[in-house]
Amino acid sequence: MSAAQNNERLSVEPLMGAALSFGGRDAAAPDLESAQVAIIPVPYDSTTTYLPGTRHGPIAILRASQQLELFDEETSQEILPKGIGTLEELEVDVGSPRAMVDRVRSLAEKILDYGLFPLMLGGEHLLSLGMIQATAERLDDLSILQLDAHADLRETYQGTRFSNACAMRLASGHGNLISVGVRSISAEEHRWARDHRVPIYYATDLREQPNWQEEVVARLGPRVYITIDLDVFDPAIMPAVGTPEPGGLGWYEVLDLLRLVSRDRRVVGADIMELCPHPGNIAPDFFAAKLALKLLVYCFQQTDGQL
């Protein structure tokens, strides 16, 4: 192991072995060398625009994941036996959204340099910027697939560029951005997306387009980062988000897209953001945990279990 790799190990390995491992003990990697995936829980929601509480999302997903079967009936594949390393929750900086993005970026760089597949659980969507920055540094052909009810393309919001509402505008400087499921957008964002030729697949249009997933994938480059804001889903099936929007995508529609992307492109990292747990209703927590599991199944199936 090189000195650089050893330094990365020293800064990452102590975080492996969180009290709650994604998928429970049967999925947990015994050490860093055995891990293929790094689950990154980040409990931060300082710039959310309506209901706070997404800081509680990562722990809710991890708790629900303890009850998941690791065998996937769709693919007849068991997901990563002993291959998932779950990090301790990343320490937050409530004083500076920009510093928090930098903190995520720094950790993601170490994880990527160590050869692990990063899957972040949030937490607010601004955090995805740090993950995308770290990934784009290592790739010159990155595509960013955003699944979201909101465009998140504002130049500034409430006096800052480092806001949940600006996350994808900032991210667009690091790769080819394609947005899917949008049904809330300002006039400013609409003009900016048009002028910068950012493809947006509005939820209302997808209802009339039976094979839209194929068209989306055709626009993506060979390597893709997937960022999922859970409000992309219809709030009838995913109500536990900070800013729900009527309409939205269904479970199987999104799975069809994720399956196709993972089959035809190389997914290099991902995040699942904005779960805002509702006390007394655990169904959304299980929804998010199962979505994470399905995404990993699809990503690892593309290379027979090896990323």
Image: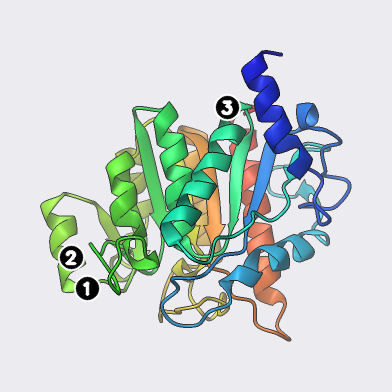
Asked if the residues shown at circle 2 and circle 1 are in contact, with their CB atoms under 8 angstroms apart, the answer is: yes
According to the picture, the residue beneath numbered tag 2 turns out to be: 190
In this view of the protein, can residue 54 be seen by the observer?
yes
According to the picture, the residue beneath numbered tag 1 turns out to be: 186
- Residue farthest to the front, as pictured: 95
Indicate the secondary structure of the residue bearing disc 3.
Answer: helix
Q: Residue at x 80, y 51 (%)?
A: 18
Quarter of the image for residue 206 reads bottom left
**Identity of the amino acid at label 2?**
His
What is the crowding at mark 2: few (fewer than 14 residues within 10 Å), some, or many (at least 20)?
some
Q: How many marks?
A: 3
What is the crowding at mark 1: few (fewer than 14 residues within 10 Å), some, or many (at least 20)?
few
Q: Residue at x 40, y 35 (%)?
A: 136
* 120 sits left or right of 200 in the view: right
Name the spot of residue 51 as percent of width and height, x first: 50, 82
Mark number displayed over residue 113: 3
**Identity of the amino acid at label 3?**
Asp
Residue in the foreground of this view, choosing between 303 and 62: 62
